[in-house]
Image (tube, rainbow, N blue to C red):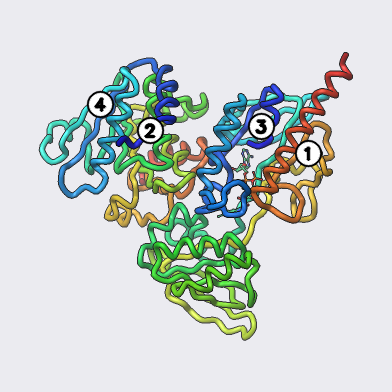
Amino acid sequence: MGLLQEKDKEYLKNEFSKLKNDVKLVLFTQEEDCTYCNDEKMLIDELGSLSDKIKVEHYDYATQNDKKEQYKIDKYPALIIEGVRDYGIRYYGIPAGYEFASVIEDIMDVSEGSSHLTEESKKKLQAINKPIRIQVFVTPSCPYCPKAVRTAHKIAIENDFVTADMVEATEFPEVSNKYGVQSVPKTVINDGVEFVGALPEDQFIDGVISALEPNR
Amino acid sequence: MTAGIYTGRAKLKTLLLEEKAIGGEIVVADIVENYPGFPKGISGSDLTSAIEEQARSFGVEICEIGATRIELNGENRIVHTTDDRMITTKTIIIAAGTQNIKLNVPGEKLFTGRGVSYCAQCDGAFFKDKEIIVVGGGDTAIGDAIFLTRFARKVSVVHRRDKLRAEKILQERAFSIPSIEFIWDSVITGIEGKKTVEAVSLKNLKTDTVVTKRIDGVFIFIGNNPNTGFVKDIVTLDESGYIITDENMGTNQPGIFAAGDIRSKMVRQVATAVGDGAMAGSSVQRYIEKLETVKK
Ligand SMILES: Cc1cc2nc3c(=O)[nH]c(=O)nc-3n(C[C@H](O)[C@H](O)[C@H](O)COP(=O)(O)OP(=O)(O)OC[C@H]3O[C@@H](n4cnc5c(N)ncnc54)[C@H](O)[C@@H]3O)c2cc1C
C-alpha cells in the first residue's frame, strides 16, 4: 500500500508536468535505530514514480561515508533536493504532515532554478560572503511551519553560501534541546541568531544578514 | 475562501491573499464538532483543505502574501502587499480574522518559544510527560486543554473567573478528565525560569495572595483582537476594532466588504464565517453588475 492517495497522485502528476530541469531527490536512511526511515523511503520512491524528471538516489547513512561527506549530512533520515546543482536544501526527519507541501514546492522551484524571492530580498542576500547554515525546527502538525521552511530554502536556492535545513524537532530531541526548541517554527542561523515564528520574507532575510556581523 | 467559491462560480476573477497559513485559524483546531455536515466531527486542517480545493476548482487564485494597505482611487481599490506589489481591483472582501491576545506579563515575551506557546497543535509534542498551564476559559482554551492531555502529564487551567465561558459539552468533558486541574479566580502575574519556563506567579483575585507554581509550559488562549490595523483608516470600526458592516457585509466604503471573525458581531465561528463569506461573495457579484450597468 502506498502512502499517497490516488487523488493526490493525480494532482501531483499534473503539477510535475510543469517541471523544467531534472530534480534529484537524494535520501540517506539507516536500517537500524530509525523510526521513520522506511516511511520516508516509501514516500520519496512514490514521488519519484510520478515523473520521469524526478530521480531518486538512496544511500545508507551508516556505511556510505563518501556521500555523507559530499552532502555534509549530520543526521538521518536526510533528504536533499538537488537541481542543476546542490542548492543546499536539506530535510532532516520525515517531511510529513504540513511539510509535505514544502517538498513539492521546493521540487518545483529547484527544477526552475528560481527562488521567487523579491528583487529587494535578492539584493540584500548579495551581502553574504561566508557560509551560513539556517536550521528551521518544525513539527508535522504545525500549519505555520512550511512558510519558514520555504523561506529558508528559497534563500538557499538564491545564495550558494547558504545551506537550509528543515529539522523535524521531535525526531531529533538532542538537537532540539540544544537550541531550547519548545515552539515551532523556530529558526537558528549559524548558532547565533534565533527567532520563533514564521516571519515575513523581509524580516527573515534581515535575520540572516544579521548573522553576518563579526561579533556573531 | 467561501466568498471565493461564490465569486469564482460567478466567473469573477478572484485573488485570495493569505499571509500565514491557507485556511485561517481553524487549521490548528484538533477537531471541529459544530460545523454542519460532519456528524463525527472533522479536523480543522481536513475541513480547510476541502474548502481550498473547492475554491481553487472554481478558479480562485491563492497568493501567499500579506496585504499592508488599501488605497481608494475613484472606483478602483488598490491593495498594497508585503512584497511591494500593488493590486488594482474593483472590490475587496476583508476577511483577515483575528489574532490571539498576549497576557502582557513579565517573562511572557522572553519565554515565547521557550515554554510559552499560543499553538497547542504546533507545540504540544514538546511537553510529553510535562506539567503545563493553559490560561483562559473559552472554547479554544478548554478544547486545547483537552487536546494537550495527550502529551502532558498534568494540565492546569488558570481562569480569572469561577466558571468557564466554554460550551457546556467541552466543560463536561474537561471536568471528567483526571489530569486536568482548575485554578479558579486567578491570573498569571509573571513567568520565570532560566533557559526555559520553570515557574509562574499566580495571583488569586479574591484573596489577593500570590503563589509560585512550578511549571514546564504555559499555553495562552485568552481571546482575540481583530486584524484591522491595515484597514483602520479606510473602513469604520466599532470600539473594539472590529469592522462594522450592514447585513449584506457592506462596509461604509462602496466596493469594500467584510466577512468572518473580523466583523463586529456576536458569534465568531466557522459556520458564521462561512455564512458571511457566502453573503459577501454574492454582494460583490451584485456590486460589479451594478457598476457595469451604470457604465452602459
Ligand atoms: C484552536 C481553535 C479552535 C476552534 N474551534 C472551533 C470550532 O470547533 N468550531 C467553530 O465553528 N469555530 C472554531 N474556532 C473559531 C474559528 O476558527 C473562526 O471562527 C474562523 O476561523 C473564522 O474564520 P475567518 O476566515 O473569519 O478568520 P481566520 O480564520 O482568522 O482567517 C483570517 C486569515 O487572514 C489572514 N490575514 C490576516 N491579516 C492578513 C493580511 N493583512 N494579509 C493577508 N492575510 C491576512 C490570517 O493569516 C488568517 O489566515 C476555533 C478557533 C481556534 C483558534
Q: Give the crowd class for mark 2: few <14, some 14-19, many >=20 residues within 10 Å.
A: many
Disc 4 to disc 3, how far (Cα)? 38 Å
Of badges 4 and 1, the one in the foreground is 4
- Residue B116 vs B284, above or below: the answer is below
Q: Give the crowd class for mark 3: few <14, some 14-19, many >=20 residues within 10 Å.
A: many
Q: Amino acid at mark 3?
A: Gly
Disc 4 to disc 2, how far (Cα)? 14 Å
Q: Which of the chains bears the disc numbered 4?
A: A
Q: Is residue B95 left or right of residue A177?
A: right
Identify the residue position indicated by label 2 in the image. Answer: A103
The numbered mark at residue B234 is: 1
Identify the residue position indicated by label 4 in the image. Answer: A56
Please name the residue shown 43% across and 50% down the image.
Answer: A184
Disc on the earlier residue, 4 or 2: 4
Q: Secondary structure at mark 1?
A: loop
Q: Amino acid at mark 1?
A: Ile
Of badges 1 and 3, the one in the foreground is 3
Disc 4 to disc 1, how far (Cα)? 52 Å
Q: Secondary structure at mark 4?
A: strand
